[in-house]
Amino acid sequence: MDAAPSHLRRSLGPVAIGAQAVGTVGLTLTAVINIPAAAAVAGRATWIAYAIALVAIALVSETLVLFRHQPAGAAGIAGYVEQGLGQPMGRLACWALLLGYGATLLACLAFLGFYIDALLPQLGLPPLPELSFLVGAAACWAMARRDVHVSTTTMLITETISVLIVLGVCALVVRQGGAAADLSAISPMGDSAGQVRAGLMIAVLSFIGFESAANLGAEALEPQRSVPLALRTAVLVAGGLFLVWAVVLTEGLSWLPAAARTGIDPISTLADQLGRPGAGIWIRIGAFLCLFGSSLGCLTALTRVTYRLAQERVLPQGLRALHPRWGTPSAALNASCGPLVLLGLALLQHRLSASRIYDLLGGFGVLAFLLVYGLVAIAALCHPLQGVGGLRRRGTAAGALLAVAAVGAGYGSSLWNGQAPLLLSFVALLGVGAALVLRRR
């Protein structure tokens, strides 16, 4: 057997980096989970919430692009924080990314297990939630430990297929609605600011993961070109699709009874009621493929962040070990995946539904990513960047910081009023990271 490599291999082109960003976002995930959740609280203002989220995330994306001459490597966008605010803050941002990717991964795995469980009766087997969860997690783990080309190619294929399936359902909605649907779905009349604010939190969650392209900077052949391209492409492609889905699917969901709209799988129900036999099954297949790709993307990013923290000696150095054949951070993969699987099983044992787990952990992940986005914007304001004019740097970063601060303040206040334990647990775990960083100093 070959000796274990000591550094991550540079072998990824622009397509692979872009697949990581788009796959982790999980385009179909938004269609089947986030759009119905946003429509339940924002109604026909859902598209407005997504439009505002797109502007905010586009500003964040452009701020990340400012750092194109300083590739972040395995630390992801936390590397940008380190370049502007120093090593301790960079390590703390890396820890926040670990929390964010970990929470998002577990949320996706919970729903992945749900869709696997939903397929068991078709095979004549009884529902087995815990086993379905384990099967999904094991499949992601097995794929993530192999050559990273395999992971990114898988994400690209699964995402493409699942998006086409959802677009087919959108076409059915437009055809079924015809002139009767008119333009009522895009009319903001009667929608309150409170509805938009409630939908905005879910809309921001939909974009989480686009920044994971930066985590593969150390494995990219041309990081200065491929990472910025992936960041921009992921945001624009996702934003365009999300706006279409927010209009069309919100209109379609309004045709369902209230109980069906608030169910765990309303888009499949909508597909079944559009008069196309088996359409709901295709939606479930698309959701399954998308969730697998998103889980794989989160696990890939989480592994790289864990590997980086081990390099910085914030975590045990043994987690720096790479797979002798594929050159992937196998030790970091095992150490990060194992505890999350155990936590997921514990939540399922307490009879928490997939949607409840997704709501809780998705909200936790949003807190982590908003914090890191804000730190990157502050880093860009504080540190001159190669090849970037001062006016452009300050204007872009200030816009991103204001957008992130506004979203974060609104989300934080809503959590404090309704889910204070979630907010306090995030602060506590962030404190653990700060203690580890200070001990390293």
Image (cartoon, grey):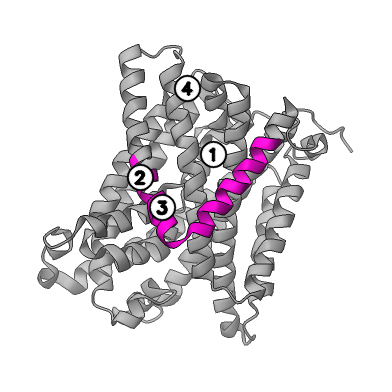
Using the image, tell me which numbered label, if any, was put on residue 68.
4
Q: Which three-letter amino acid code belongs to the residue tagged 1?
A: Ala
Quadrant into which the N terminus falls: top right
Q: Which three-letter amino acid code belongs to the residue tagged 3?
A: Ser
What residue is disc 2 on? Answer: 407
Using the image, tell me which numbered label, if any, was put on residue 206.
3
Q: Looking at the image, tell me whether mark 4 or mark 1 is earlier in sequence order.
A: 1
Residue 376's spot in the image, x, y percent?
A: 47, 29
Q: Main secondary structure of the magenta part?
A: helix
Using the image, tell me which numbered label, if any, was put on residue 152.
none
Q: Work out whether 81 lies above or below 206.
A: above
Q: Which three-letter amino acid code belongs to the residue tagged 2?
A: Val
- In magenta, the rendered stretch is 406-435
Q: Looking at the image, tell me whether mark 1 or mark 2 is earlier in sequence order.
A: 1
Q: Which three-letter amino acid code belongs to the residue tagged 4?
A: Arg
Q: Looking at the image, tell me whether mark 3 or mark 1 is earlier in sequence order.
A: 1
The residue sitting at 30% across, 15% down in the picture is: 391
* Label 3 SS: helix
- Judged by depth in the image, the label closer to the viewer, 3 or 1, is 3
What residue is disc 1 on? Answer: 16
Quadrant into which the C terminus falls: top right
Q: Work out whether 376 lies above or below 272.
A: above
Q: Looking at the image, tell me whether mark 2 or mark 4 is earlier in sequence order.
A: 4
- Judged by depth in the image, the label closer to the viewer, 1 or 2, is 2
Q: Nearer the viewer, residue 418 or 235?
A: 418
